[in-house]
Image (spheres, grey):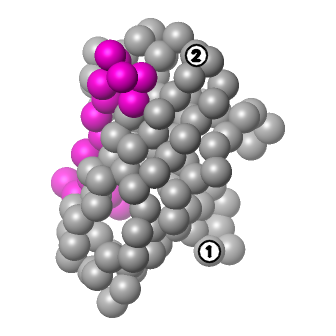
Amino acid sequence: VVLVESGGALVQAGGSLKLSCAASGIAFRITSMAWYRQGPGKQRDLVASITPRSTTTYVDSVKGRFTISRDNAQNTVYLHLNSVKPEDTAVYYCNVIGARDLDSWGQGTQVTVSS
């Protein structure tokens, strides 16, 4: 599995950002995907997930602000971040749903929200 995340940046609170993740080495079209994030000094947590048919779930802290989507033709999953807050500052990773720390991960993409 190879996962390449991109799109992270420094953004002001209230701003927007779009993250992308290109996946290879998996049967992307039939795989549920997810975005995770790891804030400073914190564990990596699930943020949002999307099934092959684009049914989505979100953790409460990002509901109404983040949107996960996918392009099965491009083997890519996206995360749109809107109305970002300083507490959204983290390294963001994508992976299959249920991925564990010992599984293969990409390098992640850094999102920093300034107040």
Provide the residue designation for mark 2: 26
Residue visible at 28% across and 81% down? 12
Residue visible at 80% across and 38% down? 102
Badge 1 amino acid = Pro
Q: Nearer the viewer, residue 55 or 3?
A: 3
Question: Which x, y percent locates residue 3?
Answer: 58, 35
Image quarter hosting the C terminus: bottom left
Q: Secondary structure at mark 1?
A: loop
Task: Indicate yes or no whether the magenta region holds residue 68.
Answer: yes
Does 14 appear above or below 69?
below
Badge 2 amino acid = Ile
Q: Quadrant of residue 83?
A: bottom left
Q: Which residues are magenta?
A: 59-76
Q: Nearer the viewer, residue 106 or 53?
A: 106
Task: Determine crowd level at label 2: few under 14, some 14-19, many 20+ residues with C-alpha closer than 10 A.
Answer: few
Provide the residue designation for mark 1: 40
Task: Indicate yes or no whether the magenta region holds residue 66.
Answer: yes
Residue visible at 53% across and 11% down? 27
